[in-house]
Structures are given as structure tokens and as C-alpha cells.
Amino acid sequence: MSIWQIIYRLIPFVKPYWRWEISSLLMTLLGAFVAQVNPIVLRYTVDTIQ
């Protein structure tokens, strides 16, 4: 069974929760972008102290 066959078989079960799926993907993307802010703030803080 290929991955696409598995996905097509799961679609009927996931369809009622499409809003949750979209929101979880958006929050994952937002979390990935927010995780990049921490090193930038840390670099600014360290450069300012020195």
C-alpha cells in the first residue's frame, strides 16, 4: 500500500475536522517563525552588552 492510498483512505475520517487541521498547520508555521525570533533577540542582547 502506497502513501497516497493511505491518505485517500484516511480522508473520510479527517474531513469533519478540516478546520482543526488547517489551524494546526497554521500554528505550526507560526511556531516555526517565532522560534527564529529568539536567536535574533539573543544576538541583539549579547551585542548590546558587549
Image (spheres, rainbow, N blue to C red):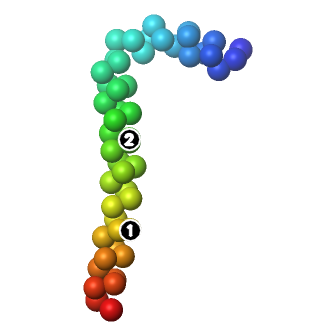
In the rendered image, which quarter contains the N terminus? top right
Which residue is pictured at 32% across the width and 39% down the height?
27
Q: Nearer the viewer, residue 2 or 30?
A: 30
Q: Residues within 10 Å of mark 2 (few under 14, many from 20)?
A: few
Separation of marks 1 and 2 at Cα, in angstroms: 18 Å
Relative image position of residue 22 (x, y in whole percent): 35, 26
In the rendered image, which quarter contains the C terminus? bottom left
Which residue is pictured at 63% across the width and 12% down the height?
5
**Residue to which mark 1 is pinned:** 39
Relative image position of residue 9 (x, y in whole percent): 56, 9
**Which is nearer the N-term, disc 1 or disc 2?**
2
Q: Is residue 9 left or right of residue 34?
A: right
Q: How many marks?
A: 2
Q: Amino acid at mark 2?
A: Thr
Which residue is pictured at 28% across the width and 85% down the height?
48
Which residue is pictured at 33% across the width and 61% down the height?
37
**Residue to which mark 2 is pinned:** 28
Q: Amino acid at mark 1?
A: Pro
Q: Secondary structure at mark 2?
A: helix
- The quadrant holding residue 44 is bottom left
Q: Is residue 8 left or right of residue 13?
A: right
Relative image position of residue 40 (x, y in whole percent): 35, 68
Q: Nearer the viewer, residue 13 or 36?
A: 36
